[in-house]
Image (tube, rainbow, N blue to C red):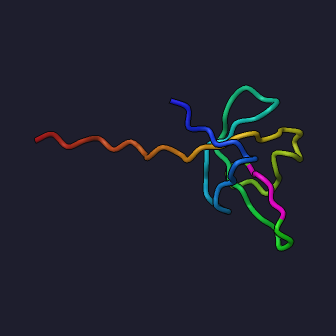
């Protein structure tokens, strides 16, 4: 199942942590999208204040994070 959302189709809500994919890096990462007062925005790794673009890494798609694992109680 492929639930990746192209950044040209839709962006995540600002501040929402999502799984991100990159044009020029093979592994996905957990990041967030933030907007500026002028309406522009960028993706940031985790809680970092430096955007992926500043590291030369370009996000091309994202998907919501899965729910955290919770062990089912035995009956």
Which quadrant would residue 25 be assigned to in this image? top right
In the rendered view, would you say 36 is above or below 11?
below
Q: Residue 60: give x, y in percent of width and height.
A: 76, 39
**Residue at image point 67% right, 34% down:** 28
In the rendered view, would you say 36 is above or below 56?
below
**Residue at image point 55% right, 32% down:** 2
**Residue at image point 75% right, 51% down:** 44
Quick one: 30 or 5, which is closer to the camera?
5
Q: Residue 9: give x, y in percent of width and height.
A: 70, 48
Membership of 23 in magenta stretch: no
> What type of secondary structure mainly makes up the magenta span?
strand
**Residue at image point 38% right, 42% down:** 69
Q: Quadrant of the C terminus?
A: top left
Quick one: 70 or 38, which is closer to the camera?
38
Q: What is the residue that sits farthest to the front in this orientation?
A: 9
Q: What is the residue that sits farthest to the bottom in this orientation?
A: 37
* Number of numbered discs: 0
Which quadrant would residue 6 be assigned to in this image? top right
Quick one: 32 or 50, which is closer to the camera?
32
Q: What is the residue that sits farthest to the left in this orientation?
A: 75
Membership of 42 in magenta stretch: yes
Which quadrant would residue 49 be assigned to in this image? bottom right
Q: Residue 54: give x, y in percent of width and height.
A: 89, 47
Q: Residue 47: give x, y in percent of width and height.
A: 69, 55
Q: Which residues are magenta?
A: 40-44
Quick one: 13 or 47, which is closer to the camera?
13
């Amino acid at each position: 199942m492929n639930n990746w959302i192209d950044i040209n189709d839709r962006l995540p809500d600002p501040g929402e942590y999502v799984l991100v994919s990159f044009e020029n890096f093979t592994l996905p990462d957990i990041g967030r999208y933030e907007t500026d007062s002028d309406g522009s925005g960028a993706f940031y790794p985790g809680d970092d204040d430096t955007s992926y673009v500043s590291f030369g890494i370009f996000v091309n798609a994202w998907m919501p994070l899965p729910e955290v694992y919770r062990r089912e109680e035995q009956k």
